Amino acid sequence: MTDKEFRHLSRTDLIEIIFELQNREKDYLEKLADMESRLRDQEIKLNNERAISEAVSALNELLRNARFEADKHLSELMSIRDNARLDADRLIREASARADSILAQASEKSAK
């Protein structure tokens, strides 16, 4: 509508236009508030997703480190076990040889 057309409108028509514009403004403000609320919700969700993602990354790193340390300790334990078996085998051989020696000496003494 042009300025000239507005000037020829009656007071009632102008009031109706103002009322209609106020209703539209109210609707737009409600829509804006709703959209801002949804935007805040989305931002909260995004922040939560980021926090979860960061926590998952940190947890994965922690588990990788724990796995590395567990593998290292397992390797050390296996090495200790292998050395203990070698020591046990050596002690058994030495004891067997000593027992054979004692038996041989006992046999010699009993034969005399």
Image (cartoon, grey):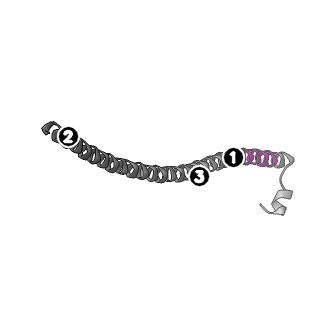
- Seen at 83% across and 53% down, the residue is 9
Extreme residue toward the front, this view: 112
The residue beneath circle 2 is 103
Distance from disc 2 to disc 1, alpha carbons, whole Å, reads 104 Å
**Is 1 left, or right, of 35 in this rendering?**
right
| Mark 3 vs 2, N-terminal side | 3
Task: Please tell me how crowded label 2 is: few (under 14), some (14-19), or many (20+) other residues with Cα within 10 Å.
Answer: few
Near-viewer residue (86 or 9) = 86
Q: Which residues are magenta?
A: 16-34
From the top left corner, tell me how far across and down residue 4 is, in percent: 84, 62
Measured as percent of width and height from the top left, residue 57 is found at 54, 53
Q: From the viewer's side, name the closer residue of 68 and 58.
A: 68
Query: Mark 1 highlights which residue?
Result: 31
Q: Which mark is residue 54?
A: 3
Helix, strand or loop for the magenta stretch, by majority: helix
Total marks in image:
3
x and y percent of residue 33 in the render? Answer: 72, 45
Mark with earlier residue (1, 3): 1
Are the residues at dot 2 and dot 1 in contact (C-beta closer than 8 Å)?
no
Is disc 3 placed on a helix, strand or loop?
helix
For the residue pair 21 and 104, the one nearer the viewer reads as 104
What amino acid type is highlighted by mark number 1?
A: Lys
**Given contact means CB atoms under 8 Å apart, are the residues at marks 1 and 3 in contact?**
no
Which of the image's four quarters has the C terminus? top left
Q: Amino acid at mark 3?
A: Glu
Is residue 35 within the magenta segment?
A: no
Determine the CA span between mark 3 and mark 2: 72 Å
